[in-house]
Image (spheres, helix red, strand yellow):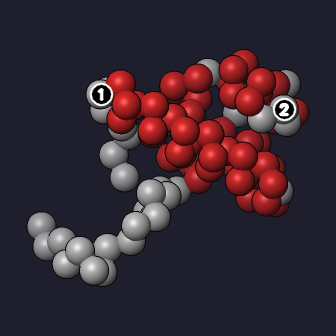
Amino acid sequence: MNTPPPAQRSRDPLHGITLERMLEALVAHFGWPLLGEHVAIRCFMIDPSISSSLRFLRKTPWAREKVESIYLYMLREQKRQGTSAPPP
């Protein structure tokens, strides 16, 4: 596999991560109830699903920013604890 030189790689930890992959990892790690506590939105608390959550998050920048923030927090905690992070 050909990897770009370090100067060309993105330093953004969210680079290459789709919103769907991010949401699936968060649900697997926290579960819907705890995710709904972190980001109090209806699509996480009432009849949650990946598809309804994706529709809402794509239209609502503040909610997406919170989800991205929680995802980055989860990655930091996993790294700190030495557990594997989801692949990019």
Q: Position of residue 36 (x, y in %)?
A: 76, 27
Q: Amino acid at mark 1?
A: Gly
For image coordinates 44% across by 57% down, the residue present is 13
Q: Nearer the viewer, mark 1 or mark 2?
A: 1
Q: CA distance from mark 1 to mark 2?
A: 29 Å
For image coordinates 72% across by 46% down, the residue present is 66
Could you tell whether 64 is left or right of 47 in the image? left
Query: Compared to 39, does 37 lie above or below?
Result: above
Q: Position of residue 85 (x, y in %)?
A: 36, 37
Could you tell whether 74 is left or right of 39 in the image? left
Q: Are marks 1 and 2 in contact (CB under 8 Å)?
A: no
**Residue at far front of view:** 80
Q: Position of residue 21 (x, y in %)?
A: 50, 46
- From this viewpoint, is residue 24 visible? no
Residue wearing tag 2? 40
For image coordinates 79% across by 59% down, the residue present is 61
Judged from the image, the secondary structure of the residue bearing numbered disc 2 is loop
Query: Compared to 20, does 77 lie above or below?
Result: above
For residue 28, the mark is none
Please name whichever residue, 78 or 25, is drawn nearer the observer in this view of the structure.
78
For residue 82, the mark is 1
